[in-house]
Image (spheres, rainbow, N blue to C red):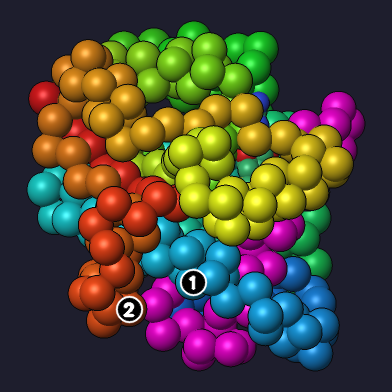
Amino acid sequence: MKTGQPSRTAYQAARYRAAHQLLERGSIFPDPIAVPLLGESEETLLADEARRGMRLFIAARHRFAEDHLAAAVRRGVTRVVVLGAGLDTFAYRNPYPEIEVIEIDHPETQAWKRSRLEAAGVTIPANMRYVGIDFERESLGDAGLGESGLGESGLGESGLAGFFLWMGVVPYLTPEAFAQSLDAIAATPGNEVVFDYAQSPERMPAERRAWLEARAARVAKIGEPWLTFFEPEEIAAELHGRGFGEIEDLGPSGLAARFFGRPDVPAETPGGHVLHARKL
Ligand SMILES: C[S@@+](CC[C@H](N)C(=O)[O-])C[C@H]1O[C@@H](n2cnc3c(N)ncnc32)[C@H](O)[C@@H]1O
């Protein structure tokens, strides 16, 4: 990310969610705050109609994440940590008053988000707080000690199991920053995480690879290059190696079958994946 500036990919992801409210009436992922938070006219959002594939992937990844979150709350989880929160709106439409929400992000992105929330007239709930971290410079496990941060013992050793929403962030981290954050989540048994990841364009068929490489070039140009890719078996090994289990990993085929009534997408189709895992 460019120093001193809020994340531009955070804005783009939020635009896809907002366009989904208008173009598909939020059929996969309803979010009543998505459009007002941007302060953009509906006309400009509707102009993005063509980017349907990405928009539906983003809608499905958040539906997947919040379905798992709901199941975790039913199991008794009382803390949700939104990592690299961007303009995610869960905290502001949180239907579970008993849970605490912590948003963690780059301080610049957070400051920009708070001004957007204010402009949109969205109230900041009492059961949430913000912690500013640069994952490339600070480890999630050590960060935010003290009263304004994550609590006396930090995240890693708090002993309280939490649910980590880590959407749209992993591809932008270095492998080292990804590993450190995952280590911190793995420090507490019962912790759950959902994140999405991208398969490497190198292994894709030519047409798909060309499309992905063009997209990668666009995000690199705005200062947020994709740095980390995984194949499903690689990410499974990373998770098992840290003691995670109950892994559910949906790629294009699984997402199409679950959310779009399309059981016909071949199982090995490469693309974006979204995954849930629980530290045993
Ligand atoms: C594509 S946005 C996704 C935002 C949001 N989670 C969503 O799904 O819309 C990437 C987010 O990761 C955050 N991010 C990227 N690199 C980071 C880093 N090194 N430290 C902290 N946050 C980072 C950005 O600030 C941004 O909010």
Q: Earlier in the sequence, mark 2 or mark 1?
A: 1
Q: Give the spatial CA distance, label 2 vs label 1.
A: 9 Å
In the rendered image, the residue lying farthest to the front is: 206
* Residue 162 shows up from this direction: no
Residue 16 part of the magenta segment: yes
- The part of the chain drawn in magenta is 1-29
Q: In which quarter of the image is the N terminus?
A: top right
Q: Position of residue 166 (x, y in %)?
A: 45, 41
Three-letter amino acid code at the position of disc 1: Leu
Three-letter amino acid code at the position of disc 2: Phe
Q: Which of 19 and 231 is in front in this view?
A: 231
Q: Which of 177 and 40 is in front in this view?
A: 177
Element on which disc 1 rests:
helix
**Which residue is the site of mark 2?**
260
**Which residue is the site of mark 1?**
56
- Please report the residue visible at 67 percent of the width from the left and 80 percent of the height from the top: 50
- Label 2 with label 1: CB-CB less than 8 Å: yes
